[in-house]
Amino acid sequence: GAVVSQHPSWVICKSGTSVKIECRSLDFQATTMFWYRQFPKQSLMLMATSNEGSKATYEQGVEKDKFLINHASLTLSTLTVTSAHPEDSSFYICSARGVVRNEQYFGPGTRLTVT
Amino acid sequence: LAKTTQPISMDSYEGQEVNITCSHNNIATNDYITWYQQFPSQGPRFIIQGYKTKVTNEVASLFIPADRKSSTLSLPRVSLSDTAVYYCLVGDEAGNNDMRFGAGTRLTVKP
């Protein structure tokens, strides 16, 4: 199946700093990418939908100025957590839409820990 | 946008067949049903997708009744490594789907 990668797989940062997470579709072009956040023992929560070349659409309650999403090419989307705080510590997962029906291919996730 | 409802958890034993049902009463005509598997600290993995009747691949079968208001993921002869959370999602072919996950079903396979 299609492969989606994320980088880094884990990151530890100090409170107040910014962290960028990359999501790449390795063997297909993805016009739409999704960003999720998942807390322990909980389901994935959709944060935003990103279409290549346009502004991301954020879910209600997600601060767009805090979680900056850029989808500059058909194979790369980035999520920047600005001025991170301990409550932003979570597992961040991206997914990319393939061309077959509406199959979604998920990245392996990025574990963010803010100290 | 169709919402889904699944049992929160299920237990099974190695070698048994496991059936997980998902309710999607408001499914639209153009919606497909897709199931994902997720292990701890990993991204969800695509299992199977279907529109109606039955779909089978190398890992699972998906049964969808005529009214399409529910679907059943069938895992034959589960092993300990099938312990995971299983999610069903519905969405249309054009991509106008609701990629919001429900709570999922936590399957525990015991020896």
Image (tube, coloured by chain):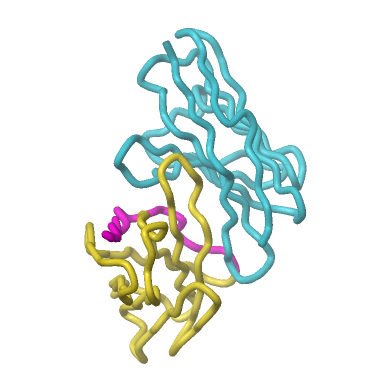
Q: Is residue B89 above or below residue A94?
A: below
Residue A28 position in % (x across, y down): 75, 56
Residue A78 visible from this viewpoint = yes
Q: Look at 48% across and 81% down and name the residue there.
A: B51
Q: Quadrant of the N terminus of chain A?
A: bottom right
Q: Look at 61% across and 24% down and name the residue there.
A: A20
Q: Is residue A9 left or right of residue B6?
A: right
Q: Is residue A104 above or below residue A90?
A: below
Residue B78 is inside the magenta segment: no
Q: Is residue B68 left or right of residue B92?
A: left
Residue A98 position in % (x across, y down): 66, 61
Q: How many marks?
A: 0
Q: Quadrant of the C terminus of chain A?
A: top left
Nearest the camera: A80 or A14? Answer: A14
Residue A57 visible from this viewpoint = no
Q: Is residue A50 above or below residue B75?
A: above
Q: Look at 42% across and 33% down and name the residue there.
A: A62
Chain drawn cyan, letter?
A: A
Numbered range of the magenta stretch:
B94-111
Residue A56, image quadrant: top right
Q: Look at 31% across and 73% down and name the residue there.
A: B18
Residue A4 position in % (x across, y down): 65, 48
Nearest the camera: B8 or A29? Answer: B8
Q: Is residue B10 above or below residue B76?
A: above
Q: Is residue B73 left or right of residue A9?
A: left
Chain drawn yellow, letter?
A: B
Principal SS element in the magenta part?
Answer: loop
Residue A45 position in % (x across, y down): 39, 43
